[in-house]
Amino acid sequence: MSGRRSAPEPHPAPDTVSDVIRWAAFSCVLVPVVLVWYGTSLAGAAGAALGLAAVTAVCRLLLRRSEQCAGRGAERGAAHRAEQRGGRHTRRRTPVD
């Protein structure tokens, strides 16, 4: 038996947006059930479910869009840093004597 261990493979980052959406979808089902249980009309509970579903859909869209923008920003930042490392900066204008 050798004393060497292989390095554990890194775990992928959890997809927190999917977790949030999953809990929101669960609440879209749970809230109307609780409302009906406590005596709210079916129409009122259905309205609450539709409202929650609409808010969940918009939040999902905004969360995914922010993830995409953050990814693009990281790529641009890396490209900009690489550009800054490479020699002369020709974009800046300096005064000529």
Image: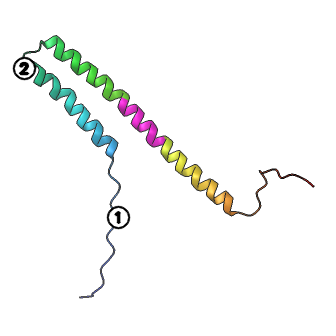
Coordinates of residue 41 in the picture (x, y in percent):
12, 12
Q: 1 and 90: which one is in front?
A: 90
Q: Which structural element holds mark 2?
A: loop
Q: Which residue is drawn at 20% across and 31% down?
A: 27
Query: Left or right: 47 with respect to 71?
Result: left
- The label on residue 38 is 2
**Residue 87, located in which quarter of the rendered image?**
bottom right
Residue 13 is a magenta residue: no
Q: 17 and 93: which one is in front?
A: 93
Query: Left or right: 84 with respect to 31?
Result: right
Query: Left or right: 54 with respect to 83?
Result: left
Number of numbered labels in the structure image:
2
CA neighbours of label 1 inside 10 A, class few (<14), some (14 to 19), many (20+): few
The residue wearing badge 1 is: 10
From the viewer's perspective, is residue 59 above or below residue 18? Answer: above
Task: Give the amino acid at mark 2.
Answer: Tyr
Q: Which residue is drawn at 29% across and 39% down?
A: 20
Q: Which structural element holds mark 1?
A: loop
Q: Which residue is drawn at 18% across and 27% down?
A: 29
**Most common secondary structure along the magenta stretch:** helix
Q: 2 and 85: which one is in front?
A: 85
Task: Give the amino acid at mark 1.
Answer: Pro
**Residue 58, located in which quarter of the rendered image?**
top left
Q: Which residue is drawn at 90% across and 53% down?
A: 96
Which colour assignment does the render follow?
Answer: rainbow
- State the extent of the magenta-drawn residues as a range: 59-68
Coordinates of residue 17 in the picture (x, y in percent):
34, 41
